[in-house]
């Protein structure tokens, strides 16, 4: 075996092991499931954009809310507001889905999820990535991840609109309050999960008080920060729960609208 | 009860070496470092391993066990099957001196690049008065035992040696966060230097540093992301910039 001195050039070498990883556990399972979960959401979202069943009684499909085009039925519009007239012929979902989509795309949790599962950078801890070069988020286009807080502002507005939609779901199809159907429960649960995900966001945590160095001088902001921090600790769980809840709620409303689901408590 | 375990241990100097097979006795309650010591005592007296406290507090016995960065003294043998072959290698990100001992001087060089804690000039040691809520964030980062497992697992330098020059690594991002959040530090740190001089932008939040931290420090959520957000305040958010101009304050 070659003896080396501190000045020897070979001293500067890492252990040469010609294997991608020595891990023996199922490290591929988590990125595999993440890949599949996000793919399902993308496929569903693509279908939902082009589906025209936006409204079922008082239930508004979350992927179509707020509906800003006159091609939407009256009840699906937010306060009757429809700035995009008959000239707009594209699916109305395109007008708004970029905002919650951008919020999730630039979210600190989802970044981990898709960097690992789609870009394999790295696929798992201690598993070599396949790329020869790596610059991370230092330059275009990934430097744009820094605009996450602006998407948070829009995401918060969308979350509040979905909460309003969930409140409207307590009306029956004739507009009378007091109705509670399966759809009402699904939309309420979805709204709660979306709110927990949105207001547990890292940017929200920073804005409330994370940017301060003296919490004691700002007790109300500190209190808000501790609340957001509690949600933030479960950000990954809320990210997945809300991703599937919004998809299931949207699918449910569209199936009711199409008449596929029509039992009495729908 | 004792049993004979199969071990594969990387042996070599500098980068050159190979995995050598051993069969070694394991007793109840032992950890991987105990087995390495038994190998030294019975079969490989020249096997090099760095260790000190055997209590997970000195950060010396960092190694990779079945491909995962771990502390040898905190990895119980009871977590493995008796018929499992356990592979032990040195940290993969740093140059090897001998066997399981690495040259981790990269980390000390990076440490020197960060200006130290600077209290106000008119406050003497012993006169610091801070509220607990103001220092508790920084205190989490003081738990770091400098085992460098986070530095080792970070793919930015683990898979790309060329990034070492520009990238300080997670251990030093928590140092930057600790000082930047400290209520008594008056050094003009300008959070954007974390990106411009210490390579914060290379981090893509994949959280491996947090996963391997034996002190369970939330490196990504409580240090890296907050510092990234502070950088956004200074570099990318026109509203914050405008607010600071109008209200004549910086944070």
Image: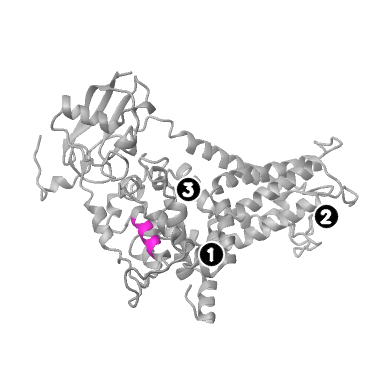
Q: Residues within 10 Å of mark 3 (few under 14, many from 20)?
A: some
The residue shown at (30%, 59%) is B166
Residue indicated by mark 1: A209
The residue shown at (10%, 34%) is A1
- Mark found first going from the N terminus, 3 or 2: 2
Asked if the residue under mark 2 is in contact with the one under mark 1, i.e. CB atoms within 8 Å, the reply is no
* Residue B139 is a magenta residue: no
The residue shown at (61%, 62%) is A153
Residue indicated by mark 2: A75
**Residue A73 in view in this figure:** no
Q: Residues within 10 Å of mark 1 (few under 14, many from 20)?
A: many
- Judged left or right of residue A235, residue A17 is left
- Mark found first going from the N terminus, 3 or 1: 3
Question: Based on the displayed image, in which of its 4 quarters is residue B6 positioned?
Answer: top left
Are labels 3 and 1 assigned to the same chain? yes
**Residue A24 in view in this figure:** yes
Q: State the scheme by which the image is colored.
A: one colour
**Eye-nearest disc, 3 or 1:** 1
Instruction: Work out which quarter of the rendered image holds the C terminus of chain A and state it.
Output: top right
Label 1 to label 2: alpha-carbon separation: 39 Å
Asked if the residue under mark 1 is in contact with the one under mark 3, i.e. CB atoms within 8 Å, the reply is no
Residue indicated by mark 3: A112
């Amino acid at each position: 075996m070659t003896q080396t001195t501190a000045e020897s050039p070979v001293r500067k070498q890492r252990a040469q092991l010609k294997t991608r990883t020595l891990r023996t556990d199922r490290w591929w399972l988590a990125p595999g499931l993440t890949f599949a979960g996000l793919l399902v959401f993308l496929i569903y979202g693509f279908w939902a954009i082009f589906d025209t069943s936006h409204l079922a009684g008082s239930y508004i499909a979350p992927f179509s809310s707020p509906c800003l085009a006159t091609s939407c039925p009256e009840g699906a519009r937010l306060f009757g507001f429809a700035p995009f007239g008959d000239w707009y012929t594209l699916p109305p979902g395109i007008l708004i889905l970029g905002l919650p989509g951008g919020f999730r795309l630039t979210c600190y949790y989802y970044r981990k999820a898709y960097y690992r599962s789609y870009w394999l950078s790295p696929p798992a801890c201690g598993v070599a990535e396949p790329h020869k070069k790596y610059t991370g988020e230092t330059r275009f286009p990934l430097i744009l991840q820094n605009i996450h807080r602006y998407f948070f502002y829009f995401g918060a507005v969308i979350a509040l609109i979905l909460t309003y939609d969930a409140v409207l779901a307590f009306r029956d199809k004739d507009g009378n309050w007091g109705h509670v159907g399966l759809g009402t429960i699904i939309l309420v649960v979805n709204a709660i999960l979306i709110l927990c995900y949105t207001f547990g966001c890292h940017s929200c945590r920073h804005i409330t008080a994370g940017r301060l160095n003296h919490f004691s001088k700002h007790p109300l902001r500190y209190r808000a920060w501790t609340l957001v921090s509690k949600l933030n600790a479960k950000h990954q769980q809320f990210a997945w729960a809300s991703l599937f809840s919004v998809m299931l709620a949207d699918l449910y409303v569209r199936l009711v609208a199409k008449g596929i689901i029509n039992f009495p408590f729908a | 009860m004792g049993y004979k375990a199969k071990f594969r241990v990387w042996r070599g100097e500098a980068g050159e070496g190979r995995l050598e097979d051993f069969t070694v006795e394991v007793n109840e309650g032992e950890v991987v470092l105990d087995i390495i010591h038994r190998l030294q005592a019975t079969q490989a007296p020249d096997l090099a391993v760095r260790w000190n406290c055997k209590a997970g507090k000195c950060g010396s016995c960092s190694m990779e066990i079945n491909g995962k960065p771990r502390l040898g003294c905190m990895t119980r043998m009871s977590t493995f099957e008796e018929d499992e072959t356990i592979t032990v290698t040195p940290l993969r990100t740093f140059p090897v001196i001998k066997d399981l001992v690495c040259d981790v001087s990269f980390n000390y060089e990076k440490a020197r690049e960060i200006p130290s804690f600077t209290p106000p000039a008119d406050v003497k040691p012993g006169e610091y008065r801070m509220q607990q809520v103001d220092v508790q964030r920084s205190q989490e980062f003081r738990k770091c035992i400098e085992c460098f497992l986070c530095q080792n697992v970070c793919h930015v330098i683990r898979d790309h040696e060329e990034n070492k020059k520009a990238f300080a690594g997670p251990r030093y991002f928590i140092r930057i966060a600790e000082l930047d959040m400290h209520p008594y530090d008056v050094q003009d740190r300008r959070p954007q230097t974390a990106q411009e001089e210490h390579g914060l932008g290379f981090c893509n939040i994949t959280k491996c540093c947090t996963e391997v931290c034996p002190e369970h420090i939330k490196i990504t959520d409580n240090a890296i992301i907050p510092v990234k957000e502070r950088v956004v305040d200074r570099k990318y958010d026109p509203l914050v910039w405008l607010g600071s101009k109008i209200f004549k304050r910086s944070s």
